[in-house]
C-alpha cells in the first residue's frame, strides 16, 4: 500500500458498522487507504486533506442524509467525487444525486468489483482535478509576480494587438513594449505567444490596468 503523503484516500460514511468494516476491508485488500465515519457530521468535522480522495456515502443517514452532505460539500467548494450507496434507492433520488455530480449510485447488495470500479473512476477524476488545481495555482503565482504594467501589456498581447498598437494604447515606445513583453514571457514561463494565450485563458479574466 502506498504510504506517501499524496497516496489516495477513500472516505466511507455509513451508520452501519458492519458495512463500514466490510468496505474498509475490501479497500485494504485492493491496496487503498480508507477512513470510516458513522455520521456525516463526523466526516465534515475532520481536518481537510490535499491528497486525491473520494467519498463512499450512504444516502440514508441519521440527521444529515447523503444528499444533504453532497449539497453542503458543493456549497463549501469541496468538489470531492461521491459514490452513493443505499439499500433504499429510488429513481428520483438517483437522478438528483447524479445531476449533482455523483460518480455512481449503487444499491445494496452490490458487487465488490462494481464498488471498486466506481472508486477507481472517482479517484482518477480527483487526481485530474488536483493536477489542474495545482497548475492554475502555479500560473496565478507567476502572474502575481508581474508588475502592473507587465499585466497590462500581457492583456493587450493576448488580445491580439501588435507591439506598435500596444505602445500607442499605453502611451510608451515600441522598444519599451518589447522589453515588457519579454519580461512577461520569461516570468510566465511561456514558450510562445500561443502558450501565453493558453495561460491567460486558464486564469481568471485579466482586467485592463488603468
Image (tube, rainbow, N blue to C red):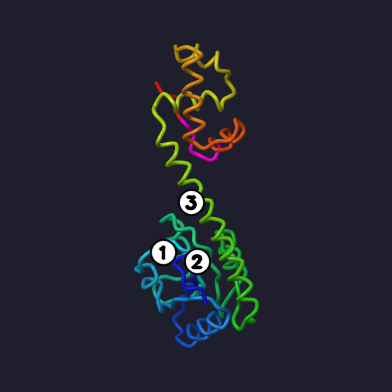
Mark 3 and mark 1 lie on one chain; the one further toward the N terminus is 1
Residue marked by disc 1? 49
Q: Position of residue 104 (x, y in %)?
A: 60, 68
Q: Residue at x 59, y 67 (%)?
A: 94
Where the C terminus falls, by quadrant? top left
Q: Which residue is mark 2?
A: 53
Q: In the picture provided, is 89 more to the left or to the right than 61? A: right
* Of the pair 209 and 85, the residue shown nearer to us: 209
| Left-right relation of 81 to 65 | right
Q: Nearer the viewer, residue 68 or 119?
A: 119
Q: Measuring 44% from the left and 76% from the top, which residue is drawn there?
A: 35
Question: Which numbered disc, 3 or 2, marks the residue that appears first in the sequence?
Answer: 2
CB contact under 8 Å: marks 1 and 2: yes
169 versus 157 height, above or below = above
Picture residue at 55% right of the left edge, 17% below the top = 163
How far is the residue under mark 3 from the one under mark 1? 14 Å
Dividing the picture into quadrants, the one containing residue 30 is: bottom right
The residue beneath circle 3 is 134
- Crowding near pointer 2: few (<14 within 10 Å), some, many (20+)? many
Find residue 143 and name its label.
none
> Disc 3 to disc 2, how far (Cα)?
15 Å
Above or below: residue 165 compared with residue 149: above
Residue 70 pos. (x, y %): 48, 63
Instruction: Report helix, strand or loop for mark 1.
Output: loop
Badge 3 marks a residue whose secondary structure is helix
Q: Are marks 3 and 2 in contact (CB under 8 Å)?
A: no
3 falls in the magenta region = no
205 within the magenta span: yes
* Foreground pick, 61 / 178: 178
Residue 107 pos. (x, y %): 60, 77
Q: Quadrant of residue 96?
A: bottom right
Query: Magenta span covers which residues?
Result: 201-206
Amino acid at each position: 500500500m502506498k504510504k506517501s503523503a499524496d497516496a489516495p484516500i477513500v472516505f466511507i460514511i455509513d451508520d452501519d458498522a458492519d458495512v463500514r468494516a466490510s468496505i474498509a476491508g475490501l479497500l485494504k485488500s485492493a491496496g487503498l487507504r480508507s477512513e470510516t465515519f458513522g455520521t456525516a457530521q463526523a466526516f465534515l468535522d475532520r481536518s481537510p486533506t490535499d491528497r486525491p480522495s473520494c467519498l463512499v456515502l450512504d444516502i440514508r443517514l441519521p440527521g444529515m442524509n447523503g444528499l444533504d452532505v453532497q449539497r453542503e460539500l458543493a456549497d463549501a467548494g469541496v468538489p470531492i467525487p461521491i459514490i452513493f450507496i443505499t439499500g433504499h434507492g429510488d429513481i428520483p433520488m438517483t437522478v438528483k444525486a447524479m445531476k449533482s455530480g455523483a460518480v455512481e449510485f449503487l444499491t445494496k447488495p452490490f458487487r465488490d468489483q462494481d464498488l471498486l470500479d466506481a472508486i477507481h473512476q472517482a479517484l482518477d477524476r480527483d487526481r485530474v482535478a488536483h493536477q489542474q488545481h495545482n497548475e492554475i495555482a502555479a500560473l496565478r503565482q507567476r502572474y502575481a509576480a508581474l508588475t502592473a504594467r507587465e499585466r497590462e501589456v500581457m492583456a493587450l498581447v493576448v488580445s491580439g494587438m501588435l507591439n506598435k498598437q500596444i505602445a500607442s494604447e499605453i502611451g510608451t515606445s515600441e522598444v519599451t513594449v518589447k522589453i515588457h513583453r519579454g519580461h512577461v514571457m520569461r516570468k510566465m514561463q511561456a514558450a510562445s505567444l500561443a502558450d501565453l494565450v493558453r495561460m491567460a485563458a486558464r486564469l481568471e479574466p485579466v482586467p485592463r490596468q488603468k
